[in-house]
Image (cartoon, rainbow, N blue to C red):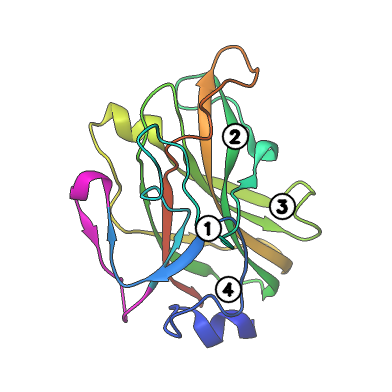
Amino acid sequence: MPQLTDNWEFERGDLRGFTTEGLCTVVKTFDAFKRTHVFHPVSGQFFAVLDDPRRIDGEGARVLNPGEPNPVSLSQYTFSPDVSGQTTLAVDGATLECRNVTVEVGQALWFHWAFTRFDWSPANDFAMFAAYEGSAVDEPVYKVYLAQSLDLERQGRWYTNWEVFSWRPTKRFCGSLRWIVANGISTSIPLPRPGGDARPSALLLDCIALS
């Protein structure tokens, strides 16, 4: 996995070795909602941030500079049930992907992650990790929902702390790893609703490694 061993802590200060969609950056610090917390790297000087909740106008709509990528449509990640027992309609956001990855039997993939919400119900922004043996339009061989903003809202929290996640496949894996953060709306009637693309949340990543 040369892409990750070269830049697994993002210490080059960029996203070399990864493919991105939407706004993805490498930073030294990141502020949670209204500076309720300031994130620093788990190790080294840098970490990655998927999407940018700070880049909005007074109505919560995204504000992009010329030449910056538009958020990517993520409707394929709509899921049910969510933490409210309803359907979360995925709208748009950002992804970070590492291709041509091999994880042998007995190895584990590790990464640190954090999630910070900038929205409130009925929005249910979420972060997830998925592994694909084929194209990213196929069904992943493995996926996990790391965080949902409604879950944090119920706890009266705007962010998670840095968390550690590991995945140990039961058979040899060769494919792509993808991290996703998406705007979402929790609803009992799964039809598109206005405002679903406002006030995005963010997924933070650091220290991706195989062991």
Residue 155 location (% of width, % of height): 25, 31
| Residue 73 higher or lower than 191, as above or below | below
**Looking at the image, is mark 4 or mark 1 earlier in the sequence?**
1
- Verify CB contact (< 8 Å) between mark 3 and mark 1: no
- Span shown in magenta: 32-46
- Image location (x, y in percent) of residue 81: 56, 24
Report if the CB atoms under discs 3 and 4 are less than 8 Å apart.
Answer: no
What residue lies at 55% left-to-right and 22% top-to-bottom? 194
Structural distance between the alpha carbons of marks 3 and 2? 20 Å
Q: Give the residue at mark 3.
A: 141
Q: Position of residue 19 (x, y in %)?
A: 64, 68
Where does residue 5 sit, x and y in percent of width and height?
Answer: 54, 85
Residues under labels 3 and 4: Cα distance?
17 Å
Secondary structure at numbered mark 1: loop
- Using the numbered discs, state the Cα–Cα distance from disc 4 to disc 1 in whole angstroms: 31 Å
Depth check, front residue: 140 or 76: 76
Element carrying mark 2: strand
**Direction top: furthest residue:** 189
Give the mark, 1 or 2, whose residue is nearer the N terminus: 1
In the image shown, does 175 or 96 lie closer to the viewer? 96
Task: Of the two numbered discs 3 and 4 on the same chain, state the one appearing first in sequence.
Answer: 4
Crowding near pointer 4: few (<14 within 10 Å), some, many (20+)? some
Which residue in the protein does label 1 denote?
23
